[in-house]
Amino acid sequence: MQTIDQITRAVCDYMKVSYSEVMGRGRSEYVAGPRMIAYYLALRHCGVTTTTVGLYFQRDHGSVVSGRLTIQARIDNEPTYRLMIENIERYIKDPPPELRPLQWTKLKPEVPGWYFYRPSPGTTRVGLLVKMNNEEAVFDAPGGYGRVRNLEGDWAGPIAEPREATP
């Protein structure tokens, strides 16, 4: 069973809107639409109440009920909207790798890409790692970027390539 957070993040990713905007107070259709879709899908797939969804989004019960009814009306009256919701549901059931829960392993990645790395289990220090041409390079903010070889520790990923935060 999915969590409200997983569903919300998948909706945000699918609809290309930031998680912070959906969780914020904005009321434009650009943000409120995905937020109401997340309400609707959380109620459908998480086995939670409208009160629980409201607490997650810091909204009252009435806002969640209204959002659910709005989405249901659009599904009932707009075939293309219904198809979009079905596509989002498929996306939630089989999310891209960067949205899946990470599994830590001692096996070093064999495929080039971005990965999380931690020197030992339970440590809170985690760096991002990219493996390039049989060399390992650690990207470790705030320490900067440096090349290292033969890292021993735990790995999780692959993850999406990190990008600069937008204001």
Image: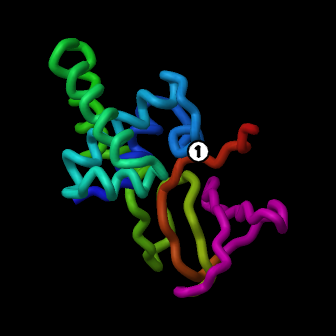
Residue 152, percent from left and from top: 59, 82
Q: How is the image coloured?
A: rainbow
Q: How many marks?
A: 1
The stretch drawn in magenta includes residue 129: yes
Q: Which residue is mark 1?
A: 20
User: In this rendering, is residue 66 above or below 120?
Assistant: above
The stretch drawn in magenta includes residue 46: no
Q: Residue at x 57, y 65 (%)?
A: 116
Tell me the magenta residue range. Answer: 121-149
Residue 108, percent from left and from top: 50, 71
Residue 71, percent from left and from top: 28, 27
Q: Seen in the image, is 79 located left or right of residue 60?
A: left
The extreme left residue here reads 76
Q: Seen in the image, is 146 located left or right of residue 89?
A: right
Q: Residue at x 69, y 72 (%)?
A: 149
| Disc 1 element | helix
User: In this rendering, is residue 145 above or below 84?
Assistant: below
**Residue nearest the viewer, comparing 123 with 149:** 123
**Residue nearest the viewer, comparing 93 with 62:** 62
**The disc labelled 1 sits on which kind of residue?**
Ser
Q: Residue at x 40, y 46 (%)?
A: 8
**Residue nearest the viewer, comparing 75 with 92:** 75
